Image (tube, grey):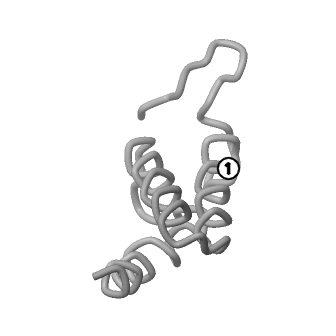
Amino acid sequence: MLEVAERSASIIFEDVIRSGFERPQTSAYDVASSVAAMSEFAEVTKDPKYEDLATLARRWFHGRNPASAPVYDVDLGLVADG
């Protein structure tokens, strides 16, 4: 089952995360779900690729996104939700 889950995760998440979520529309919830999924895969598989993907996805909040603008205000602890 894990093998199937990893293949699915690769198809669904990997390219989107690596692109910086370059899509017509992305919300903070989409990205947060991606971070959570990749973090879980990292924990279960011990494969550093998934932690790397989780880290790339987290960076979306800090400006690694199509707008090149942070959506997380560190000082206030708030995320713009669109």
Q: Quadrant of the C terminus?
A: top left
Mark 1 belongs to which amino acid?
Answer: Arg
Q: Which x, y percent locates residue 21?
A: 52, 62
Q: Is residue 35 left or right of residue 77?
A: left
Horizontal side of residue 29 vs 75, given as left or right? left
Q: Quadrant of residue 11?
A: bottom left
Tell me which residue sits at (62%, 30%) in the image. 72
x and y percentages locating residue 66 in the rendered image: 61, 57
Q: Identify residue for label 1.
A: 59
Q: Quadrant of residue 2?
A: bottom left
Q: Residue furthest top?
A: 76
Is the residue 58 above or below the residue 6 in the image? above
Q: Residue at x 52, y 78 (%)?
A: 15
Label 1 residue SS: helix
> Residue at left 40%, top 51%?
33
Q: Is residue 3 above or below residue 40?
A: below
- Split into 4 quadrants, where in the image is the N terminus? bottom left
- Looking at the image, which residue is at 34% across and 81% down? 8
Reply above or below: 24 against 18: above
Q: How many marks?
A: 1
Instruction: Check disc 1: other Cα within 10 Å, few if <14, some if 14-19, many if 20+.
Output: some
Residues 82 and 5: in front is: 5
Q: Is residue 29 left or right of residue 76?
A: left
**Residue 23 x %, y %:** 45, 65
